[in-house]
C-alpha cells in the first residue's frame, strides 16, 4: 500500500511582478490615506471590492491580490498605472 503526502505547490512569482504589485499597493495606500477614502467609496466605483480587501491592502498584504485586481482598485481611486518594459 502506497502512502501519499499532500503537496502544497509554491507558485513561482516573477520578481518583476512582485515589484509591480509592491509599487501599486504602496500607491493605493498612499492615495487612500491622503484622500481619506473609505471602502464604501471605492465600492461605488469597483463593485466587487470589500472592506476586508481594503483592510488587507492597508496592512501591506497586497501580494495576495493579482495585478489585474490591484490595477482595477488603483484606477477606481484615481491612481494611474503605467508599465515600462526595457
Image: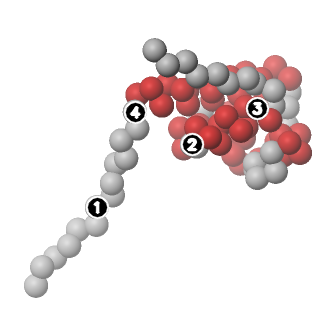
Give the residue drawn at x 81%, y 20%.
Answer: 34
Whole-Å distance between the Cαs marked 1 and 4? Answer: 21 Å
Give the residue drawn at x 65%, y 37%.
Answer: 70
**Residue 31 at x, y = what percent?**
77, 23
Q: Secondary structure at mark 1?
A: loop
**Residue 12 at x, y = what percent?**
36, 41
Say whether disc 4 or disc 2 marks the residue closer to the N-terminus: 4
Say whether disc 2 or disc 1 marks the residue closer to the N-terminus: 1
Indicate left or right for 79 with 85 as reference: right
Could you say which disc has been placed on residue 14 in the image? 4
Is 84 rendered above or below residue 11?
A: above
**Residue 40 at x, y = what percent?**
87, 44
Q: Secondary structure at mark 2?
A: loop
Task: Give the residue at the far top of this rendering.
Answer: 86
Say whether disc 3 or disc 1 marks the residue closer to the N-terminus: 1
Disc 4 packing (10 Å; few <14; some 14–19; many ≥20) = few
Disc 1 packing (10 Å; few <14; some 14–19; many ≥20) = few
Say whether disc 1 or disc 4 marks the residue closer to the N-terminus: 1
Q: Are marks 4 and 2 in contact (CB under 8 Å)?
A: no
Say which quarter of the image contains residue 65.
top right
Could you say which disc has been placed on residue 7 in the image? 1
Could you say which disc has been placed on residue 16 in the image? none
Could you say which disc has been placed on residue 75 in the image? 3
Can residue 26 be spotted in the picture? no
Is 74 rendered above or below residue 54?
A: above
Say whether disc 3 or disc 4 marks the residue closer to the N-terminus: 4
Whole-Å distance between the Cαs marked 2 and 3? Answer: 14 Å
Pointer 2 residue: 66
**Residue 43 at x, y = what percent?**
84, 46
Is 75 rendered above or below residue 51?
A: above
Amino acid at each position: 500500500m502506497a502512502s501519499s503526502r499532500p503537496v502544497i505547490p509554491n507558485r513561482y512569482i516573477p520578481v518583476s511582478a512582485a515589484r509591480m504589485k509592491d509599487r501599486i499597493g504602496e500607491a493605493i495606500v498612499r492615495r487612500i490615506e491622503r484622500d481619506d477614502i473609505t471602502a464604501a467609496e471605492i465600492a461605488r466605483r469597483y463593485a466587487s471590492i470589500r472592506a476586508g480587501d481594503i483592510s488587507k491592502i492597508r496592512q501591506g498584504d497586497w501580494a495576495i491580490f493579482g495585478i489585474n485586481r490591484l490595477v482595477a482598485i488603483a484606477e477606481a481611486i484615481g491612481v494611474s498605472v503605467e508599465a515600462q518594459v526595457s
